[in-house]
Amino acid sequence: MMPRLLLICYYFPPMGGAGVGRPLALFRSLKDHGIDCGVLTVKDVAYRVFEPELLHGLDETRIHRAGSRDPQRLLRLLGVRKVRASRIGHAGRLSNRFFPDPKIGWVAPAVRLARKLIRENRYTAMLSTSPPISGHLVAQAVQVETGLPWVADFRDFWTSRRIEDDIADASRRERAWELIRSIQGSAVMVTTCNPAISEYLGGGEVIYHGYDDKLAQRWRTPSPGSLFNIGLLGTFDELVPVEPLLKVLAVVRNRAPQLLTSVRLLQVGQVDPGWMNGLLDRYSMRDIGVMHGFQSRRRTVEILNEASLFYFALASSKECGASRVYDMLVSGRPILAGLPPDSVVAETIVGAGVTDCFDPHNAEDIERAAAFVEHLIRRHHAGELSITPRPDYARPFSASAMVAKFADVIHGL
């Protein structure tokens, strides 16, 4: 009998951004592994970015949307479609007002719809993926009623931060850990997107995020030219800082001023323009910044095909990273990574052999990173910088590899 999976996820197209990539890939491709998959998600909400084109070609009769009383849904009902990207510490007033998270208002409507879907479609298993943690509460409530085997997938620790970093109140922290233990006790399996989250939770099978296989076919080598373009992909803010790169480029400028005149920063993704331009002004580099903002996935690749180097950063070793790393790897470009010591992301990208990681708080590391960049610029100008898209080292991090591993899990339930 073909397994029938109910995939429970709050973040799903037409919402866009990195958070929808994992559930979208599962919904698209599990059928290729003999699994009938339906999605339970939320109705239209106010959100920071939308990519409705991601729904093209999908069987939307299998996408089921529950109402909600969470703030984003209520804003949408009031006529607000887009909200500004905000990462105010993840422990801001809104997060502290709700438990386990502001999406708790989605749980009851989603549970009601899940009951109906299971009766009508005879699902044989469930997979919930967080954030938000509230998604696991939906699956847990249904599992108690139906006994269906359930896999709990964690794409982050709690939010992108750990419980102790995200929740200030001690009693709420203990309540959060009690909830995590309850989820672990109810689910037949816990999966995570990297080893750091598995270690934090005390166990869980690691299934890495993956780049979009079809989109990866659009990566090309940079066109010949005099400019050396550094790609800035994705969201940059206080958790994903751009200032370490500017420190490195300032050293390059001091060593070889003529080289920096040929450098451009190609930014594609969510960023506060005022914040970014303020940093560029501080380092007298406004003239090298080329700001594109958020773009469709195809357009993003078109723009960043002109990059000869990618920059990636995380402010804390406690951050688990982002799926954009896998897009950088499959592009074949070298990566300059500003990461604290012991970052789990460093283990992934250094293993690819095309990366230089530096500690943004270590002056010697910044000097070494500057030498790495200077070397690449000189090789670029000499026509000696070879870039091969879709290299072998990126293959383990494809969406198809990720889906295949989840399929093995589901078939084994």
Image (cartoon, grey):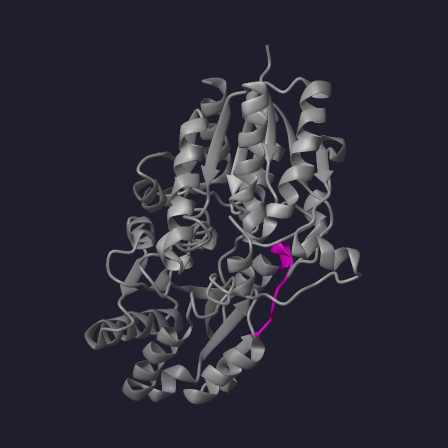
Q: Quadrant of the N terminus?
A: top right
Magenta residue check for 86? no
Is 308 in front, or is 296? 296
Give percent across and percent down for residue 177.
38, 44
Q: Is residue 292 magenta?
A: yes
Left or right of 211 in this view: 168? left
Q: Is residue 207 visible?
A: no
Question: In the image, what residue occupies the spot 35% across and 74% down?
Answer: 244
Q: Residue 284 versus residue 70: which sits nearer the camera?
A: 70
Q: Position of residue 205 (x, y in %)?
A: 37, 32
- Please tell me in which quadrant of the rendered image residue 212 appears: top right
Total marks shown come to 0
- Residue 54 horizontal side relative to residue 239, left or right: right
Residue farthest toward the top in the current orientation of the protein: 1
The answer to whether residue 209 is seen in the rendering is yes
**Residue at 33% in and 72% down:** 373
Q: Is residue 224 above or below residue 219?
A: below
Looking at the image, which is closer to me, 100 or 189?
A: 100
Q: Residue shown at 53%/41% (left/top)?
A: 22
The answer to whether residue 388 is above or below residue 80 is above
Where residue 339 sits in the image (x, y, percent)?
A: 31, 63
- Residue occupying the far front of the picture: 171
The magenta segment: 291-299
Q: Choose between 215 and 411: the one closer to the eye.
A: 411
Can you say whether 26 is above or below 188 in the image?
below
Task: State which quadrant residue 387 falls in.
Answer: bottom left
Q: Can you give x and y, in whole percent of width and height, for residue 285 in the image?
A: 45, 85
